[in-house]
């Protein structure tokens, strides 16, 4: 039993540290995922949405600390109980997402490792089993190498988490796992390779045959039925290939400017998924940086999910010397974890990405 407990202790501790550290690298992204869960069509807890970032920070730091405390054998009862309650909650959440197909990616490992809902649930069930083993063998969880070292290690881990979180919140994630990372070409990221798997759909055809309703399922072809057609329902049963970058458009008044903008040799994009939530200080810094970019020959555009009733007053208030185009809010949130933020592109390739706090670092020469 001792060896089984030590094995479980090592696996659970390492997984919690890795999972928490990946999300700690991008707490804003994890907060967006929590907002999905809090939505009306999932858990229906909209009152928690304004606190999503704070909850995200607490959860990821606590996750890392629990992993460290378990490996060091510090406060074993508190640690094991906390691990148990956390994994029970997340097992319920991932099952709910998988069974009702509500959130297609749990965000367990951020953007570094994408898991399907059922894969996430399976992972949590395995962790739950390992943590139950820890419960049964708590007496074998000894401080390593001592209680004082456990306390010191936990405090050091907490300080490291706080400092790291402060850095990524005021700048950008240190490691960018998203498809819009520096060096990525947006047009190339939207290409679907020849011969890539296509989605498979199941069609449920409803007919009235001899006065009774009858449903016939096919994967596309219209069934040969001697009856009156009533309705058809479509369900995707197998996903096809999805390019890393999708749902990316640059539109204005219904016209698509994506290809034109991505062909620009010197382009600066100001990303603000919701200008009503944009930092006033950030917009002022953006103003100074974009004025310099325009003077140095760059084409500058804004990209927002806000409409003209919101964008125009912002342009007037901050005297911005560039127009705004429409892009989906989720896409903009994925591009840069700053509202507003800056992207510099050369012929569609991202060469610089900045938080508004670093706007002065925009290189235009």
Image (cartoon, helix red, strand yellow):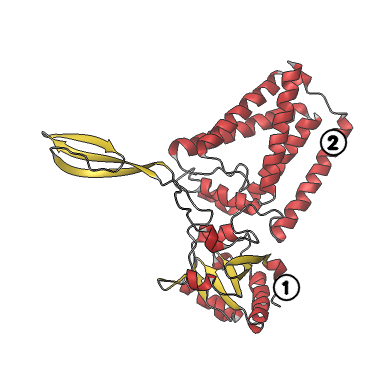
**In the image, is residue 214 above or below residue 56?**
above
Camera sees residue 152: yes
**What residue did someone put label 2 on?**
151
SS label for mark 2? helix
Place residue 256 in its image quadrant.
Answer: bottom left
SS label for mark 1? helix
Give me the residue at 47% from left, 74% from top.
308
Q: Where, quadrant-wise, is the C terminus in this rendering?
A: bottom right
Query: Left or right: 313 with respect to 72?
Result: left
Taking the view exactly as shown, the residue that stands out farthest to the top is 1
Give the mark, 1 or 2, whose residue is nearer the N terminus: 2
**In the image, is residue 255 above or below residue 136?**
below
Q: Which marked residue is nearer to the observer: mark 1 or mark 2?
A: 1
Taking the view exactly as shown, the residue that stands out farthest to the bottom is 295
Give how far across and how far down residue 242 sits, in percent.
Answer: 48, 50
Give how far across and how far down residue 191 sits, in percent.
Answer: 49, 57
Give how far across and how far down residue 110 sits, in percent.
Answer: 62, 46
**What residue did someone put label 1 on?**
360
Give me the residue at 69% from left, 76% from top.
364
| Relative depth, front residue between 263 and 358 | 263
Give me the residue at 67% from left, 67% from top.
356
Separation of residues labelled 1 and 2 (CA atoms)? 41 Å
10 Å neighbourhood of mark 1: few (<14), some, or many (≥20)? some
| Relative depth, front residue between 298 and 190 | 190
Taking the view exactly as shown, the residue that stands out farthest to the front is 194
Q: Where, quadrant-wise, is the N terminus in this rendering?
A: top right
**In the image, is residue 282 above or below residue 80?**
below
């Amino acid at each position: 039993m001792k060896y089984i407990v030590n094995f479980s202790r090592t696996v659970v501790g390492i997984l919690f540290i890795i999972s928490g550290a990946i999300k700690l690298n991008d707490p804003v992204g994890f907060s967006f995922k929590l907002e999905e869960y809090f939505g009306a069509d999932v858990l229906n807890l909209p009152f928690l949405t304004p606190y999503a970032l704070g909850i995200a920070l607490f959860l990821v730091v606590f996750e890392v600390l629990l992993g460290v405390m378990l490996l060091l054998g510090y406060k074993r009862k508190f640690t094991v109980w906390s691990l148990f309650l956390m994994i029970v909650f997340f097992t319920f959440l991932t099952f709910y997402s998988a069974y009702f197909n509500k959130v297609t990616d749990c965000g367990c490992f951020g953007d570094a490792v994408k898991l399907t809902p059922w894969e996430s649930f399976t992972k949590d069930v395995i962790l739950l089993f390992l943590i139950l083993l820890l419960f049964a063998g708590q007496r074998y969880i000894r401080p390593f190498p001592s209680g004082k070292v456990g306390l010191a290690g936990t405090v050091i881990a907490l300080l490291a988490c706080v400092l790291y979180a402060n850095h990524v919140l005021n700048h950008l994630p240190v490691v960018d796992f998203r498809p819009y990372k520096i060096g990525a070409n947006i047009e190339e990221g939207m290409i679907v390779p020849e011969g890539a798997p296509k989605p498979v759909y199941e069609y449920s055809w409803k007919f009235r045959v001899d006065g009774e309703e009858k449903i016939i399922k096919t994967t596309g072809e219209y069934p040969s039925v001697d009856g009156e057609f009533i309705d058809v329902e479509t369900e995707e049963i197998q996903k096809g290939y999805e390019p890393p970058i999708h749902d990316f458009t640059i539109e204005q008044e219904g016209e698509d400017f994506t290809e034109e903008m991505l062909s620009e040799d010197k382009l600066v994009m100001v990303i603000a998924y919701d200008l009503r939530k944009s930092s006033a200080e950030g917009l002022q810094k953006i103003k100074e940086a974009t004025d310099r970019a325009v003077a140095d020959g760059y084409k500058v555009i804004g990209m927002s999910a806000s409409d003209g009733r919101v964008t125009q007053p912002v342009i007037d208030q901050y005297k911005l010397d560039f127009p705004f185009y429409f892009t989906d809010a989720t896409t903009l949130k994925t591009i840069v974890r700053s509202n507003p933020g800056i992207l510099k592109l050369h012929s569609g390739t991202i060469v610089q990405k900045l938080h508004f706090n670093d706007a002065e670092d925009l290189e235009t020469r």
